[in-house]
Every structure is written in structure tokens, then in C-alpha cells.
Amino acid sequence: MNIGRDQTPAEVPAWIEQDIDGNQIANIQQGGCESGAYMPAVTYYKALETMSEHGDEVLQHIQDCYGELPKPRDDESWAGMAVHYLSISVELWAGGFEVLEDGEAACLTCEDTFTTSEAYVRGDEFCQDCAIGDDAKEAQS
Ligand SMILES: [Zn+2]
């Protein structure tokens, strides 16, 4: 899935900060959550909070990608396990994106890429075709 550096994906799972952008995704791909690229997954109290609310989905996401759940490390704390699994899941999710070069954006509907200097609309989130399609739908309702 293509994503521009300043763009937020159209769909972000509930267990990831909803305002995550392409830049953060690129940093997660490069250094993992642990590098500081995604603090909510490596901060104990934040990770515990997220896992108590969405833990089932997070573990399911890992299983869907790997076919099984990786074993926890020995002597791991409960909070450490929350960080461990949430980080893995966030990194797997981030890995599904192709982060575009500076100045490029992707249409959040059809994934066509375009440069942000071109005359596109709505915060560069849609290509002209999809934006026009949306407006037409709105006009009908
Ligand atoms: Zn489009």
C-alpha cells in the first residue's frame, strides 16, 4: 500500500495511534518501535493500556501474519510482554506500506501516486478522479 510521508492511512487499526503518518511508518520500518520511532508501543503504561483494550486483535494480527504466536522471552514481565507483542504487531503493520519520496502522495482510494505540487484536492488525499467521484456521491445524497 502506498503512503505519502505526510499522509495518514485511510484505515488505521484501533491499537495504533489514529494520527500516525508516513514518516513514522518509515521510521518504524527502519529501526523498529524500539528505536523510538513509535513510543506508544514501547512505553510500559501505554502498551499495557492498549493491550488491555485491544490485546486480542493485536495477537490475532500477529498470528495472521506469522501463522503462530512467537514465544515470549524468558523472565519477561507482564508489561514487557505487552510491549513485546504490541511492537511486533505494529512493525508487521508498518511493513505493509510503501512509503513514498518527499513531495509524493498516494490517493487514499485508488492508491495512484502523484506529486503534491500537482493540482490535486482535499489535502492531497485523493487523486482528481476519486475526489470527483466522492463529490458526485455527496451531491446525490
Ligand atoms: Zn484515486
Image (tube, helix red, strand yellow):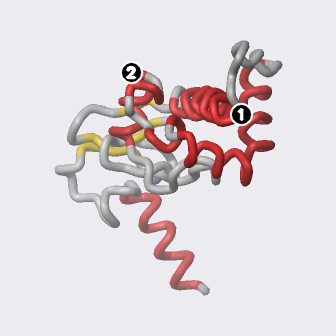
Return the mark for residue 131. none
Tell me how far mark 1 sits from mark 2, CA to CA.
27 Å
Q: Quadrant of residue 48?
A: top right
Contact flag, marks 1 and 2 (Cβ < 8 Å): no
Q: Nearer the viewer, residue 97 or 88?
A: 88
Identify which residue is drawn at 33% across, 45% down. 105
Where residue 135 sits in the image (x, y, percent)? 47, 75
19 shown above or below 43: below
Q: Quadrant of residue 56?
A: top right
Q: Is label 2's Cβ within 8 Å of ligand 1?
A: no
Identify which residue is drawn at 49% across, 32% down. 97
Q: Secondary structure at mark 2?
A: helix
- Quadrant occupied by the C terminus: bottom right
Return the mark for residue 30. 2
Q: Nearer the viewer, residue 60 or 11?
A: 60
Q: Which residue is mark 1?
A: 78
114 shown above or below 95: below
Mark 2, Cα crowd under 10 Å, few <14 / some 14-19 / many 20+, is few
Label 1 is placed on what type of residue? Trp
Label 2 is placed on what type of residue? Gln
Where residue 85 sits in the image (x, y, percent)? 67, 30
Q: Is residue 53 left or right of residue 88?
A: right
Identify which residue is drawn at 42% across, 42% down. 112
Residue extending furthest toward the left: 117
Q: Is label 1's Cβ within 8 Å of ligand 1?
A: no
